[in-house]
Image (spheres, grey):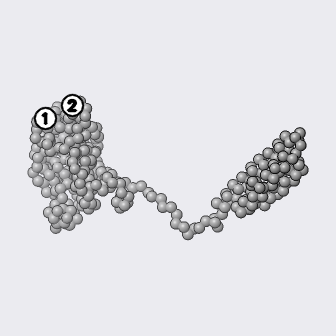
Amino acid sequence: MLDEIQKLKEEATASLTGLRTQEDTENFRLQFLSRKGSVAQLFEKLRDVPKEDKPAIGKSLNELRTFLESEFESAQKKIAGEKRADTGSIDLSIPGRKRYIGRRHPLTKTAEEIKRIFTCIGFGIADGPEIEDDYHNFEALNFPPDHPARDMQDTFFVKADAGKYVLRTHTSGVQIRVMENNKPPVRVIMPGRVYRNEAISARSYCLFHQVEGLYVDKNVSLAELKGTVAYFAKEFFNAEAKLRFRPSFFPFTEPSAEVDVNCFLCGGKGCRICKYSGWLEIMGCGMVDPNVFKYVRYDPNEVSGYAFGMGIERLALLRYGIDDIRLFFENDLRFLNQF
């Protein structure tokens, strides 16, 4: 029996050296390692071996089976590796997997362009909390508790401390925080997310982004505000941009104005983007109300200033000719890949 085991081992070892393909390995398995293979047949003969010889012969059989299984597995891995390395087995006509390269979101591109324009003329950049207290979001901006101007803001109130906290409705609260912590002159823009409790539609969303600006120093004039806004419009849209200032009202500026730029898509002739008026509204602005200065302990007799604010989504809609604000938030690759 021991001679048969040794003979089978030599035969199987010789067969292992001749394995070249997966078909060869399968034939080897059937011949030696399957249920009806040579090794299994020797185990069946173990029943006829004298009792005193069974331990030694059984040990030899187990060693043979373990050896052949190990060698067989190694041969399989070697053949599989050679097949993967064989370029002749690869169909080079099959298209490869396309790698998608990330790009900046159109809102990010628009915000970065706005920041670039203003930092080039000396504005810094400030940030503030998105959960704001009532004082910085309303009161210090000349919104008394019973002021009707509060009705202009559709506010999300945070359930904390009897409604004294809100999701900020504008980044104007950052203006107050900057002036509280810095003496004039102040020249800064405040980009960030803001929230309004509005019905979601093609023209409005509950979340959007703003960039507000503030400049405070001695003898700041309305002419400087108009010059700054004109510079921005020409840099952001085109050098031929024409502006129109319309009187308006904001609690924290006086006088106040809304700014329109001639429609760069139709050249002022009228199209669906400008609602056939030839003009596109781009921002609100005005001279800082003296009451606001009192809240931050600036002397309105010594300093003056201007402020402005614009929606990043609105500017992106106008710049790219998009007619639905919801597209910015749906993360549809068919839309985003266009940018």
Amino acid type at image mark 2: Ala
- Image quarter of residue 188: top left
Residue positioned most to the top: 161
Q: Which mark is residue 311?
A: none
Amino acid type at image mark 1: Pro
Q: Is residue 288 left or right of residue 96?
A: left
How many numbered callouts? Answer: 2
Is any part of residue 17 visible from this angle?
A: no
Q: Nearer the viewer, residue 52 or 305?
A: 52
- Image quarter of residue 18: bottom right
Q: Where residue 336 appears, x then y in whole percent?
A: 36, 58
Q: Where residue 293 appears, x then y in whole percent?
A: 15, 36
Q: Nearer the viewer, residue 142 or 186?
A: 142
Q: Is residue 130 left or right of residue 307?
A: right
x 17%, y 37%: residue? 138
Label 2, secondary structure: give it: loop
